[in-house]
Amino acid sequence: MAISDIGIDRPLPANLDAERFVLGAIMSDDSAFLQAAGLLTPEDFSLEKHKRIFLRMGELHERGEKIDRVTLANELMKQGQLQSVDGLSYLVSLDDGLPQLHNLESYVAIVREKALLRRIIVVSQDTINRAVQSEEDPRQILGAAEDALMKLGDMQSRNALASPAQIVTEYEGGINAFLDTSKRIKGISTGFLKFDEMTGGLREGELFILAARPAMGKTALALNMAQHVAMNPKNPKAVAVFSLEMSKESLLTRMICASASVDQQRFRAGYLNHDERTALQNALYRIVESQIFLDDTAGTNLMDVHSKLRRLQAEHDLGLVVVDYLQLMQGRGRFENRVQEISSLTRGFKLMSKELRVPFLVLSQLSRATETRQGDHRPMLSDLRESGSIEQDADVVAFIFREEVYRPDKESLKGIAELILAKQRNGPTGRVKLAFLNRYTRFENLSADTGDEPAPFE
């Protein structure tokens, strides 16, 4: 839908003086074009003639020609557009009122802000029109609106290139703080020492993909990490867990049994002794006092997750978001195939993570290739189901592997799990060995001394 098609009583947001000053500043000094072009497109201008002028400026720049009134007028004349921009007299008037020491950066910011407001209006009006016509499934209309708004947010995340001097100057505390490792932002501890050592913990704005075949323990490991973040006595933070597979009650049961070291089968059957009941009660008290928030809403989508997290973050110090699991989510809108749909979800989680400045731990299924592979069954990046951009968008991709599943006869493998760091954007790859206590569905650190004895992860 074009902006001109929108039927509203009030004029659309625009600042014509800021647009004129941007164009005028470029004509007075054509080196300013690069600064403006790095942040603006012709479509960011509200007037058609301003769009045409900026577009022709770009063509002159691409050919290495100087941008001034004469060359610009000649370029517009070649395209038969000089009269449509009100002639040479309008080009001459563009720098009227432009301060001698102009602030191009501020003018560009104003133009971008108004352009974003107009685009929001376009998306909103299009959504209203489709809803009024009622010719589509409401979920498709909502999905299209969600995708359009997410894309607008992505467009606004473009930043100008920065020099090392700018980066250090803008860093809080200046050069001394930049070089002081004790003052650098550290990731949130997961409770698994070797994993934290290799990754630096779960860092804000990063997307962590934890993948495994069914029954390998990915939900258990994610809940172990979530509990540690929420119940860490040194620095407890709020954790949001979105489960598309298990109910809130089942998740809570898992966490209580894991924390109390009580066999889940005995709990479900009701065969508990006095010590186990006491341990469960104490574990429940600790979890109730923590800031763990569970959501088991069926059909959860990106917009639902985003709105719930914004509200939660306004009230609590949000430290981690867990999504279990990726393939059970559905993108809103139309997609040619499932790969495109999954790609839109991972991209959405990555953008949300950056916007909210919170790490996202998103669980994912693996294909059957690991089971049909001869010899080594350890997962590889190519085993990610409907991978699309999963690997591309993720900052860290980790796999859970328990060889005892494939070799149950080998006693030495029982209770040993590997957390395989297959990709890490800002660190090393490798393997972390963990203890897996199947009865409690809990992972623990291995003792650094013996290499095979469990040590509590909390």
Image (cartoon, rainbow, N blue to C red):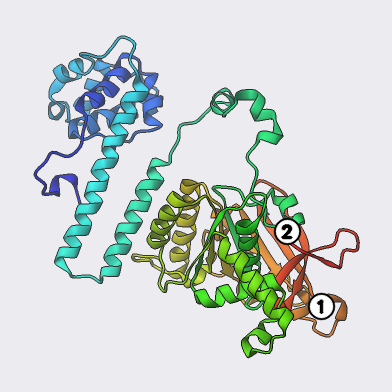
Which label was assigned to residue 192?
2
The residue under label 2 is which amino acid type?
Answer: Phe
For marks 1 and 2, the one nearer the N-term is 2
**Residue 215 seen anywhere in this rendered image of the structure:** yes
> Judging from the image, what secondary structure is the residue with disc 2 in?
loop
Residue 414, numbered label: 1
Decide if residue 246 is in sight here: no
Neighbour tally class for label 1: few under 14, some 14-19, many 20 plus, Cα within 10 Å = some
Mark pair 1, 2: CA separation: 19 Å
Q: Residue at x 80, y 84 (%)?
A: 408
Front in this rendered view, residue 68 or 314 = 314
Of labels 1 and 2, the one closer to you: 2
Give the image quarter of residue 42.
Answer: top left
Which residue does the image show at 37% across and 50% down from the upper left? 151
Which quadrant is home to the C terminus? bottom right
Q: In which quarter of the image is residue 400?
A: bottom right
The amino acid sitting under disc 1 is Lys
Q: In this view, does 295 lie above or below 429?
A: below
The location of residue 115, given as percent across then percent down, is 27, 38
Q: Is residue 377 left or right of residue 447?
A: left
Relative to 280, say whether 268 is above or below.
below
Label 2, residues with CA under 10 Å away: few <14, some 14-19, many ≥20: many
Name the residue located 36 percent from the left edge and 20 percent from the top edge: 65
Residue sitting farthest toward the left: 9
The x and y percentages for residue 216 are 67, 75
Residue 58: x and y in percent read: 34, 29
